[in-house]
Amino acid sequence: MKKMTDDPSRDNNSIDLFADIGDIPDLFPEEDGFSLAGLASVLMSECIPEARAEAKQKANRAIRRWWERQGEAERAAAAQACKLHYRPEADPAAGRRTRDDLSDLQEELFEIQLQDAALQLELDEMSREVERRVQARLAEERARRKPPLATEAIPPEFDMTGEATAPNEASTEGTGRYLLDPGALKNLPEGGKQIERNAALHAACAGLLPYREIRDRDLFARIRHQLGEKYPHATSVIDGLLRPLERNFDTGEARLKLRPTILVGAPGTGKTALLRDLAAGLDLPIRAQSVAGQTDSNLFGVSAGWSSALPSIMTTVIAAVQVLNPLIVLDELDKAQTSHNGSIQESLLPLLEPLEAGHYHERYLASAVDASHLNWIFTANTLERITVPLLSRCDVFEMPQPDVAHVAPLARSILRAHADSLGLQPGFFHLTQGDLEFLEKTFPQHRSIRVLAELVRQLITDSGQGMAHA
């Protein structure tokens, strides 16, 4: 049993929870600092801290029964173990009492906790099953009411180079519109007519597009394992990014929708690389763009009537990948500038509000688009220059700096990635023990994954590997 601090307020906080213990008169004066309710509070917080109210009532009764059975010596030992002051008195009924060790009571309380945890899991599973059935019925009803789509062909998917790729059949069941009124294309000024000459852009604005979805819950566990091996210092970040997707999936939502997030950390900690690998694991198209030194003058588009007409980054990315919910990563958001042309951070605010983003006015298209399905993640070295309104709309995760203990797994991950980029087997490259010792010895000088990767590449390309022994 771990030690408890003597908190005089513990008894007062426990009166309501253990009201029925009050049926047993306290055998000792209040000035002695002991009460049965206080003892029960310590035991409950130790053995069943997360139980439901029903289980706590059951444990309460078990504590009371145990107390009534014990002699003064056992009571005194229990109070002392819980760091409560106790003064034994004469025990006229000692001959009729059992002599149970406190551990017997603790084992009974732990068993109550286990039974309650099992019941909670069962109830949670029943709740999820009911929710899944409800969502399935709703999906069937939506499908029944939805008009046939035979007259509108879904355009092919494109990778980031613009080349057509095979569709992901497991993740294209839902479709929607980006440009809410395709007829608005006819009203664009002359500068916008180039949309008709850009097949991908025209398809994104005129037709229906798919959402990228997930159909296998086991994928989350696989991504955690793969990214955890590659980024051993960032397991809490990985879990924080995946958890909202898991909650959505458990409520019947297969569409991939990440929370707006700011990933803050020192340069070289692997922020953008982690996000690229996360997107690859989810089969989610991604565009990463640095906004250091930029204002919003071009990022969010220029009206088609101007000679410098330009679609917004949202329209550009959706046209390139032909998916409604790609991931857009804006790197170094804390270094974005504010000028008379605007502010990137201010311009992002309506895009992070689902209702406003659902009818966002796209300057280039001069019409409303549904940008509510886009996924936004931002990286920064510090939060000092991130505005409060933007912070309030985002989850914030700190990207930890790796330490020496992470060097070996990071180096192995870098080797695998390098071999894969060259089309070679992972075992083709090898680092000696001397190489690893060199990398670990020099790591505190830079603490950067980027620098570590460069050192690993130098080691494996140096035929003599002399650096490892320098």
Image (tube, rainbow, N blue to C red):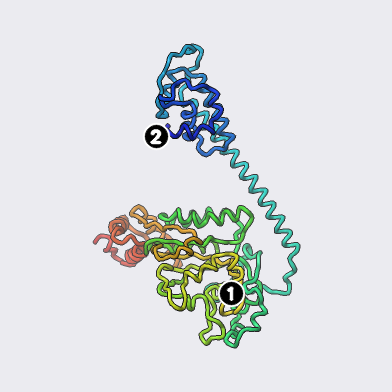
Measuring from the top left, give residue 43's x and y in whole percent: 47, 31
Measuring from the top left, give residue 76's x and y in whole percent: 42, 22
Assign the C terminus to one quadrant of the image: bottom left
Q: Mark 1 = which residue?
A: 361
Q: Taking 457 as reference, is 29 left or right?
A: right
Q: Label 2: few (<14), some or many (≥20) within 10 Å?
A: few
Q: Is residue 335 visible?
A: yes
What residue is shown at x 65% (from left), y 69% (from top)?
176
Q: Closer to the camera, 213 or 359?
A: 359
What residue is shown at x 44% (from left), y 61% (from top)?
263
Structural distance between the alpha carbons of marks 2 and 1 = 59 Å
Compared to 365, does 425 lie above or below? above
What residue is shown at x 43% (from left), y 56% (from top)?
234
Q: Is residue 418 visible?
A: no
For residue 5, which numbered disc appears in the image? Answer: 2
- Look at the numbered disc 2 and give the secondary structure of its residue: loop
For residue 55, which numbered disc appears in the image? Answer: none
Q: Amino acid at mark 1?
A: His
Labelled pair 2, 1 in contact (Cβ < 8 Å): no
Q: Amino acid at mark 2?
A: Thr
Q: Closer to the camera, 460 or 307?
A: 307
Q: Taking 62 as reference, is 177 left or right?
A: right
